[in-house]
Amino acid sequence: MKKFILILSALFLISTLSYSTTVKAKVGIQKGNEAPNIKITDLNGKTVNLKDYRGKTVLLNFWATWCPPCRAEMPSLEEVWVKNKKDITILAVSIDEDSTANVKKFIKDSKYTFPVFHDKKGDTVSTYLIKNIPTTYIIDKDGIIIDKIVGGIDWTKYKFPKVGK
């Protein structure tokens, strides 16, 4: 009988520990939260979900063509993208209110190759409560926000936190 109770207790403990490691993070926009899913449309009209990028580290970058700090950081974003696109993806979300064609022209003229999206209606800006640009969320392979940077930086000098497994 003691063996049975001991085994039952051990199984209960294992199942409890197993459950506690699979509890999902709360959805939100703070470090440690699961990043809210968003649907965004790229410059060619294709719509994707943020969740489509699970398994990769994501730089969710909010910017505008008229923003000097945004424009200043873009060459370093391009460099990070070119060197690390197997492990990291960039989702550069333009918040420009003008036409997608103008954003597309800016990207083409600047020769940027990272994925660019246009949030003309401000849906993602509302979801992520963007007040200043550029603002970038670093989201790990499991969809958890691990960093938030407000303001332009040189992305080639950014020390990416160890992410995923």
Image (cartoon, rainbow, N blue to C red):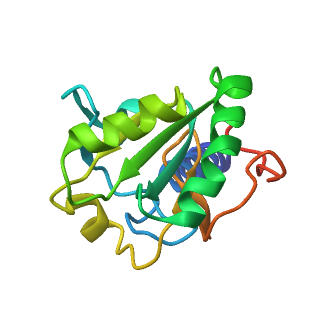
Please state the horizontal and vertical placement of residue 144, each as a whole percent of the image.
53, 53
Tell me which corner region of the image, top left, top right, bottom left or bottom right, holds residue 72.
Answer: bottom right
Please state the horizontal and vertical placement of residue 58, each as a whole percent of the image.
54, 42
Outermost residue on the front side: it is 109
Instruction: Please name the residue shown 48% across and 46% down the image.
Output: 143
Instruction: Please name the residue shown 45% across and 45% down the image.
Output: 92
Q: Nearer the viewer, residue 92 or 103?
A: 103
Q: Is residue 68 above or below residue 11?
A: below
Quadrant in the picture for the C terminus: top right
Outermost residue on the top side: it is 86
Residue 32 in sight here: no
Outermost residue on the left side: it is 121
Tell me: 22 left or right of 106: right
Please state the horizontal and vertical placement of residue 88, each as a whole percent of the image.
62, 33
Q: Nearer the viewer, residue 64 or 66?
A: 66
Please state the horizontal and vertical placement of residue 94, each as a whole percent of the image.
36, 52
Instruction: Please name the residue shown 51% across and 30% down the image.
Output: 114
Instruction: Please name the residue shown 40% across and 58% down the image.
Output: 64
Q: Nearer the viewer, residue 10 or 63?
A: 63
